[in-house]
C-alpha cells in the first residue's frame, strides 16, 4: 500500500509520503482537528487519538505474532536512535538479537 501511495503522489524534496499540497509536513497542532478526525469520521472510525493508534498498532503486532519484548525494544531503539537501524531489533522475532528468552 505504501508503494502505491508513493507512485500515486508527486515526489517532494523532503521525501514525505503524505505531505500537504505544498509538499511540506502537516502542522502537528492542526493536523488532528483539520484532517485526521474528519477523515476518521468519514471512514466510520470512532474518535481516536494518536495515543490510541499507538496502542492499536502494538496490539496488531502482538496479534500478528510479534513478542511484546520485541515491540518494547523497537520503541526504545527508535527513541534512542531516532529510527530503527539497518539491523534493528525487530528484524528477528525469535529473540536472538535481544538475548531474550521469548518462549
Image: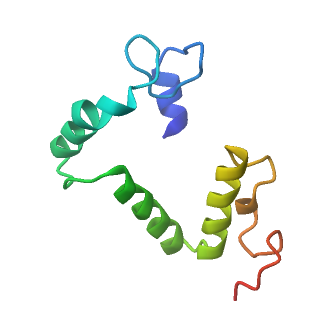
- In the displayed structure, 82 sits above or below 30; it is below
Q: Quadrant of the C terminus?
A: bottom right
**Is residue 67 at all visible to an observer of this figure?**
no
Q: Residue at x 35, y 59 (%)?
A: 52
- Give coordinates of residue 19: x percent, y percent: 44, 22
Which residue ends up furthest to the bottom in the rendered image? 103
Task: Kindly identify the residue that appears in the image at 71 percent across and 70 percent down.
Answer: 93
Q: Is residue 98 visible?
A: yes
Q: Describe residue 94's horizontal placement relative to residue 60 as left or right.
A: right
Residue 9 placed where, x, y %? 46, 20
Task: Please indicate whether residue 4 sits to the left or right of residue 20 in the image.
Answer: right
Res 67 → quadrant? bottom right
Q: Quadrant of residue 56?
A: bottom left
52 or 43, which lies in front? 52
Q: Examine the rendered structure and indicate whether residue 72 appears above or below residue 18.
A: below
Name which residue lies at 77% across and 47% down: 85
The vertical placement of 95 against 61, above or below, is below
Nearest the eye: 75 or 10: 75
Q: Picture coordinates of residue 73 (x, y %)?
A: 68, 65
The residue that appears at 46% across and 66% down in the rendered structure is 60
The one nearer the camera, 22 or 65, is 22
Residue 2 screen position, x and y as percent: 52, 37
Amino acid at each position: 500500500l505504501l508503494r502505491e501511495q508513493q507512485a500515486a503522489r508527486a515526489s517532494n524534496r523532503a521525501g514525505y509520503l503524505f505531505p500537504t499540497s505544498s509538499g511540506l509536513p502537516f502542522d502537528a497542532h492542526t493536523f488532528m482537528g483539520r484532517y485526521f478526525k474528519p477523515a476518521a469520521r468519514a471512514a466510520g472510525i470512532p474518535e481516536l487519538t494518536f495515543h490510541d493508534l499507538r496502542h492499536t498498532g502494538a496490539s496488531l503486532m502482538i496479534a500478528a505474532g510479534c513478542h511484546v519484548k520485541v515491540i518494547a525494544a523497537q520503541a526504545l531503539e527508535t527513541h534512542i536512535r531516532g529510527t530503527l537501524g539497518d539491523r534493528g531489533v525487530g528484524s528477528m522475532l525469535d529473540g536472538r538479537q535481544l538475548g531474550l528468552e521469548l518462549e
